[in-house]
């Protein structure tokens, strides 16, 4: 009795919470998170179609099975309440045979073997077709980009242009882009839900994925393979531009940033080049050639800092420089010991890196 009462209370409580849980599920669909249903690339559209097929088949099977289950419960109840009446209404021949005999064998053969086999063959066929289309190795591409995973940021190199950047991948709208993926340390996974499925980035190996975007937009990408304590803070942006704007971006990126003209920015540049910053980061046109951290040549033109976790503005950049471990514990960038004046000079310089 005690346990019954406990379970009854417990069920009451969970019953009352259920609507809130349901609301949470629906609310989770709000916000800015990228969604596979907003497919904007060929790869994502094919995956989306397969998902809807699986959802449709799964729902149909669920409805039919639940229908039979309810029917069985109803008939069982009828038999229990009034066996004589149930016998009259439910059975017409030998009751043993009708409830346990050849009719049920047919149900098992059709419902348990033949129909599931047909459904699985359909699923297999469509899945295979989608996988085949997504992994075709001979796809032509208008542009090739190498993306290298690091703990916890993304290095981006344009194969046919002298451009190295970080955490943002600019692509031209409507063109096929070959992305060659690898990693500098542990296994990461490249995922832009609105453009394509996931693909692992494995040290010592190059995996290739083809993406395209059918309209100009900014598409969030995320790391989809646990890669250490800050895995959840490893984002990037794919920025799809109309071809003319993309070409303009390409030529801008190939220019070194202008030399700072203001005295404070010049002081900041000298600080940067004389300090450990230049050992880990590169800035085109200067003696900073480090490759441990992101290339900073056009830092000020990027949308975000620290691999998508902070908006790129002066306050955030200052806070990041002072204590990067506060935002992303365990990352390779040490806290700085700059005085306030030095920090302001450094920020003034970094702001010139357009
Ligand atoms: Cu990189 Cu998870």
Image (cartoon, grey):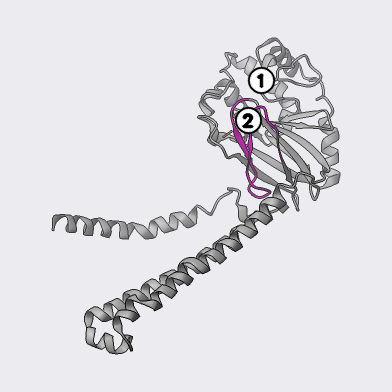
Report crowding for label 1: few under 14, some 14 to 19, many 20 or more residues within 10 A (C-alpha). some
| Along the viewing direction, whichever of 259 and 16 lies nearer the viewer | 16
Real-space Cα separation, disc 1 to disc 2, in angstroms? 11 Å
Q: Main secondary structure of the magenta part?
A: loop
The magenta stretch spans residue 197: yes
The magenta stretch spans residue 148: no
> Cβ of disc 2 within 8 Å of ligand 1?
no
Residue drawn at point x = 39 percent, y = 57 percent: 20
The extreme top residue here reads 274
Residue 87's tag is none
Q: Position of residue 117 (x, y in %)?
A: 54, 64
Per the rendered image, the range of residues in magenta is 185-208
Considering the numbered disc 2 on the image, is that residue within a helix, a strand or a loop?
A: strand
Q: Position of residue 245 (x, y in %)?
A: 83, 43
Q: Are marks 1 and 2 in contact (CB under 8 Å)?
A: no
* Residue 41 visible: no
Considering the numbered disc 1 on the image, is that residue within a helix, a strand or a loop?
A: loop
Question: Against 218, is 168 above or below?
Answer: above
Residue drawn at point x = 32 percent, y = 74 percent: 73
What residue is disc 2 on? 153
| Along the viewing direction, whichever of 101 and 236 lies nearer the viewer | 101
Residue 292's tag is 1
Residue 267 horizontal side relative to residue 68, left or right: right
């Amino acid at each position: 009795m005690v346990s019954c009462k406990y379970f009854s209370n417990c069920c009451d409580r969970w019953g009352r919470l259920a609507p809130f849980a349901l609301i949470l599920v629906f609310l989770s669909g709000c916000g800015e998170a990228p969604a596979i249903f907003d497919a904007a690339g060929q790869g994502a559209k094919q995956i989306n179609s397969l998902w809807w097929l699986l959802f449709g088949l799964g729902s149909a099977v669920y409805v039919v099975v639940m229908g039979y289950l309810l029917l069985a419960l109803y008939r069982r109840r009828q038999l229990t309440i009034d066996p004589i009446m149930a016998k009259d209404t439910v059975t017409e021949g030998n009751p043993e045979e009708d409830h346990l005999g050849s009719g049920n064998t047919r149900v098992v053969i059709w419902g348990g073997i033949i129909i599931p086999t047909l459904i699985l063959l359909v699923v297999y066929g469509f899945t295979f077709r989608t996988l085949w289309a997504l992994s075709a190795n001979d796809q032509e591409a208008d542009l090739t980009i190498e993306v290298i995973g690091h703990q916890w940021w993304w290095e981006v190199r344009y194969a046919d242009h002298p451009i190295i950047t970080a955490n943002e991948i600019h692509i031209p709208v409507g063109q096929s882009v070959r992305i060659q993926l690898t990693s500098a340390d542990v296994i990461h996974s490249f995922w832009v839900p609105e453009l394509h499925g996931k693909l692992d980035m494995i040290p010592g190996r190059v995996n290739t994925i083809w993406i395209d975007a059918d309209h100009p937009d900014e598409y969030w990408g995320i790391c989809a393979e646990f890669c250490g304590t800050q895995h959840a803070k490893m984002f990037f942006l794919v920025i799809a531009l109309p071809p003319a704007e993309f070409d303009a971006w390409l030529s801008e990126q190939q220019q070194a940033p202008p030399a700072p003209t203001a005295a404070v920015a010049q002081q900041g540049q000298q600080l940067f080049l004389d300090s450990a910053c230049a050992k880990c980061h590169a800035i085109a046109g200067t003696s900073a050639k480090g490759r441990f951290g992101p290339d900073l040549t056009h830092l000020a033109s990027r949308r975000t800092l620290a691999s998508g976790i902070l908006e790129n503005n002066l306050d955030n950049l200052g806070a990041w420089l002072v204590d990067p471990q506060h935002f992303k514990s365990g990352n390779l960038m040490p806290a700085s010991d700059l005085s306030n004046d030095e920090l302001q000079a450094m920020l003034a310089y970094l702001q010139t890196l357009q």
